[in-house]
Image (cartoon, rainbow, N blue to C red):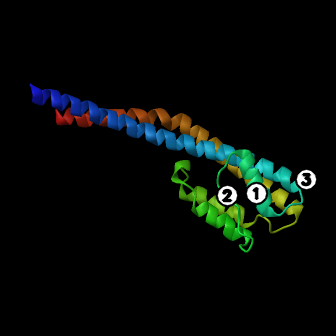
Amino acid sequence: MICLVIKLIGCLLIASAGFFTGCVLTQRLKNRRDFYDKFCVFISLLQTQIRYNSADIFSLVISSARGSGLELFDTPKTDVPFTAFWDNSLSALPKKYGLNNSDKELLYKFGSALGTTDIEGQLKHLGLYGEIFQNRLSECENALKDKSRIYRALGLFGGISTAIIIL
């Protein structure tokens, strides 16, 4: 009798673990979407800063990031070029954002051209990448809408299936 109760508790725990796994995958999708949402705000703020502020690129990027809620950048060392600062900041991105390799590669490409041209060139660069990141945001929203229920359901059913096999 006790053995059956222990098996039932174990099966419930396995089913819960499967559901929890689906919830974790859904949370990754949400984090990726939230990152792109904040990054689109960052680009918009950076466009405004470049247009109306004559500060260096380090200050503009840091203030725009803080204004958008992105916590990506620390105060830079003055002897480091901007591209190295950008690359170091991206390499330290936490996994909590749920970004994949193509996302990171796009971010590296975006940062490699910041601060290298005149104001009009920078605004065009930001406009181009703003559209690209806006498209990524739309993709993230669609993926979240399409996959979140599936991840939770598959996790739950996978856990239940494993529990049934154990019984």
* Image quadrant occupied by the C terminus: top left
Cα–Cα span, label 3 and label 1: 14 Å
Nearest the viewer among 33 and 79 is: 79
The location of residue 155, given as percent across then percent down, is: 37, 37
Cα–Cα span, label 2 and label 3: 22 Å
The residue to which callout 3 is attached is: 52
Q: Are marks 3 and 1 in contact (CB under 8 Å)?
A: no
Circle 2 Cα neighbour tier, 10 Å, few/some/many (<14 / 14–19 / ≥20): some
Circle 3 Cα neighbour tier, 10 Å, few/some/many (<14 / 14–19 / ≥20): few
Furthest-left residue in view?
1
Quadrant in which residue 141 is drawn: top right
Mark before the other along the chain sequence, 1 or 2: 1
Quadrant in which residue 57 is drawn: bottom right
Three-letter amino acid code of the residue under disc 1: Val
Mark before the other along the chain sequence, 3 or 1: 3
Q: Are marks 1 and 2 in contact (CB under 8 Å)?
A: yes
The location of residue 150, given as percent across then percent down, is: 44, 35
The residue to which callout 2 is attached is: 73
Residue located 23% across and 32% down the image: 11
Secondary element at tag 2: loop
The location of residue 163, given as percent across then percent down, is: 23, 34
Task: Tell me if I can see residue 162 in this picture.
Answer: yes
The residue to which callout 1 is attached is: 61
- Classify 62 as above or below 167: below
- Classify 3 as above or below 55: above
* Image quadrant occupied by the N terminus: top left
Nearest the viewer among 135 and 19 is: 19
Cα–Cα span, label 1 and label 2: 8 Å
Furthest-bottom residue in view?
79
